[in-house]
Amino acid sequence: MRVSRDAGPLNGDYMTDVIIAGAGPAGLMLASELRLHGVRALVLEKDAEPTRIVRSLGLHARSIEVLDQRGLLERFLPLGQQYPAGGFFAGISKRAPDRLDTAHPYVLGIPQTTTDRLLAEHAAELGARIRRGCELAGLSQDDHGVTAELADGTRLRSRYLVGCDGGRSTVRKLLGVGFPGEPTRVETLLGEMEVAVPPEALATVLEAERPEQALVFVRTKIRCDQLYRSLRDRGMNVKALHGDMSQGARDGVMISFKSGSLPLLVATDVASRGLDISGISHVINYDVPMSPDVYVHRIGRTGRVGRSGRAITFYESRQARDIQAIENHAGVKLSPWVKDAHVAPTPVKAPLRRHSKPHVSANGDAKSSKVIVSGGRAAGLEPSDIIRAITSATALDGEKVRNVRILERFAFVEVPESEAERVVEKTGGTEVRGHTLRLELARA
């Protein structure tokens, strides 16, 4: 057995005060905290190089507070994205409380690989030693301290040893500490990928097209925020529109866009329902629509009232079948985008459905009625919940359910006047998020 030259006598001097097994965020942060108190710390990590696998995608409010307290937050913020704090359970998103008891009411999206690097730099600056390629194989303890044996036979002596080596902890196993429970029978795999269409590509198209007014569609709220920030940081006059925004914020954005003072809007499909604007010159699908029907709804927002319009869709080669399905469904041929190139306008027409939904005139001039819905923010309701409840109960086209306004105890929504009574009758009694909806017409 080989003894490390700086290990010191096994029962006398110690090479360090604390050995930390595991150079993840917990181990590195612990090493830094110990150094702030003058404690010598040695971090052992079995991997010879930092992993490139992203095991975690963000930091929550409490972790951000700790980083702020230690003067580290300014290192992290420029390398991450801030997202509104919220919850997600059983496929249902939940808005965060209005008043969180924190100075940082957001989630910081940042890959763990970056977090590990920044924390390792901080620990090293404070004098902690980090040894990679050192796998813990055994340990023994006596009245004076701990002897750690590495896989290559090296023995290290310290006063304490701390296991920060994750769920499959070697330290836990060597100590004989059980981890009771039934092992999972599900193989969970993570596929890490880079987004094929960078924001720069969209910026290039926008600069070439110079749209009078453009509506850019994305699939998710997180992606909506990311793209909005990227375009804003390039100096573009742009806003985001998605379901995690407050009703007041959404109303403000929609008013600006409808008035024409906002030339560029990045939006999700659900949040943009009810947008009926004649001046949109461009619809851009930054993400390929989930279905051909969604494509038809999206691009129907341009080229209205006798105007011409441009519809541009970004896609990856693996999505060629999705593009073909859109072409077959809408009866169009999507031509490759080239700067300054124009193609003959093609009318988009979705095939007839097996059942017909009630529709109002496409020019948006049909009269609408306002409906009062019992339940609002206090019941956890969001605009998408009310839209979904009405369309499911009545088969009414989602485009005709407009101007949903969520208040504390109730909500307002506008539907075609000719369908208002049927909406009230059919949707009443529907249960949403454990709350039974009651609807009535708002009387003038």
Image (cartoon, rainbow, N blue to C red):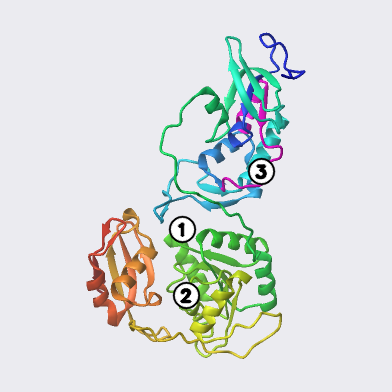
User: Of the residues under marks 1 and 2, which one precedes in the sequence?
Assistant: 1
Q: In this view, does 4 lie above or below 209?
A: above
Q: How crowded is mark 2: few (under 14 residues within 10 Å), some or many (20 or more)?
A: some
> Mark 3: which secondary structure?
loop
Instruction: Tell me which segment is drawn in magenta.
Output: 28-57
Residue located beneath label 3 in the image: 51
Residue 268 in view here: yes
Q: Which mark is residue 244?
A: 1
Q: Position of residue 270 (x, y in %)?
A: 44, 68
Residue at the right extreme of this rendering: 5
Q: Is residue 57 left or right of residue 198?
A: left
- Per the image, the residue denoted by label 2 is 294
The one of 174 and 118 positioned closer to us in this rendering: 174
- Which image quarter is the N terminus in? top right
Q: Depth-wise, is mark 1 or mark 2 nearer the camera?
A: 2
The Cα atoms of the two marked residues, 1 and 2, are separated by 21 Å
Amino acid type, mark 3: Thr
Q: Where is residue 237 drawn, in percent x and y?
A: 61, 67
At mark 1, the secondary structure is: loop
